[in-house]
Image (cartoon, helix red, strand yellow):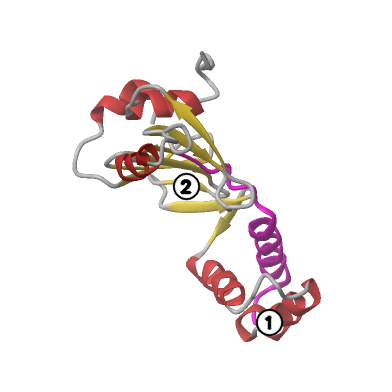
Amino acid sequence: MSLENIDKLEGDYPFIIVDDTSRMFLFENNKFFSISFPFQINVDKKQVRFLSMPLTLGLLSIVSSILNDFDERQSMIELTEKILDNEEYNALLKDEQQTVEELIVCLLSYETGYVRYDYDLENYEKYKSLGKPDLHPLNHLDINYTSNATYKIGIKNAIDIKVFWDCLDPNTDCWFFK
């Protein structure tokens, strides 16, 4: 979907769009999210691809079961053991096993590219009452997902879905801070 077609979006929030830039967009009232998306989805062909390889629900299920049992505090050796001990993984053909391995490595090292526009009246009022309204602006962008890497950019006015989409579209002119 292109920015020109965004007017055609209808229905209640939330809804999700995955576009050609491999970004997923989620729109809810007063919040717009976007993350990088490691898969290509072809709705017409009902196909999900990873690194140009088609993915089946079976492969995704195996990856999911392995990662659900993995704790990020565990070592890569422990992850390798979980993979090698997985019966479904062991039943796969060698090229399917390689796809599972590549997908797991990709997902564990994947940069999410998380950005969220937020109109947050509750927190704005809270910090305003403390005399610090710029600590949590009414309109802002939250960048990065984890708390140790996140940062906030205040925006003077509310933005709509078109502006948010356009800010993240590499095929349109850049937006600038004022």
Q: Amino acid at mark 1?
A: Asn
Magenta segment, which residues?
Answer: 91-116
- Horizontally, is 174 left or right of 30 in the view? right
Q: In the structure shown, which secondary structural element does the residue marked by tag 2 occupy?
A: strand
Which of 1 and 165 lies nearest the eye of the viewer?
165
User: Residue at the spot x=19%, y=41% of the render?
Assistant: 11
Q: Amino acid at mark 2?
A: Ile
User: Residue at the spot x=36%, y=39% of the render?
Assistant: 124
Looking at the picture, does residue 45 appear above or below residue 68? above
Q: Residues within 10 Å of mark 1 (few under 14, many from 20)?
A: few
Q: Residues within 10 Å of mark 2 (few under 14, many from 20)?
A: some
Quadrant in the picture for residue 150: top right
Query: Looking at the image, is mark 1 or mark 2 earlier in the sequence?
Result: 2
Quadrant of the rendering where the N terminus is positioned: top left
| Tag 1 and tag 2, C-beta contact below 8 Å | no
Which of 140 and 45 lies nearest the eye of the viewer?
140
User: Residue at the spot x=67%, y=60% of the render?
Assistant: 108
Q: In the structure shown, which secondary structural element does the residue marked by tag 1 occupy?
A: helix
Residue 166 location, x and y as percent? 44, 23
In the picture of the structure, the residue carrying the numbered disc 1 is 90
In the picture of the structure, the residue carrying the numbered disc 2 is 41
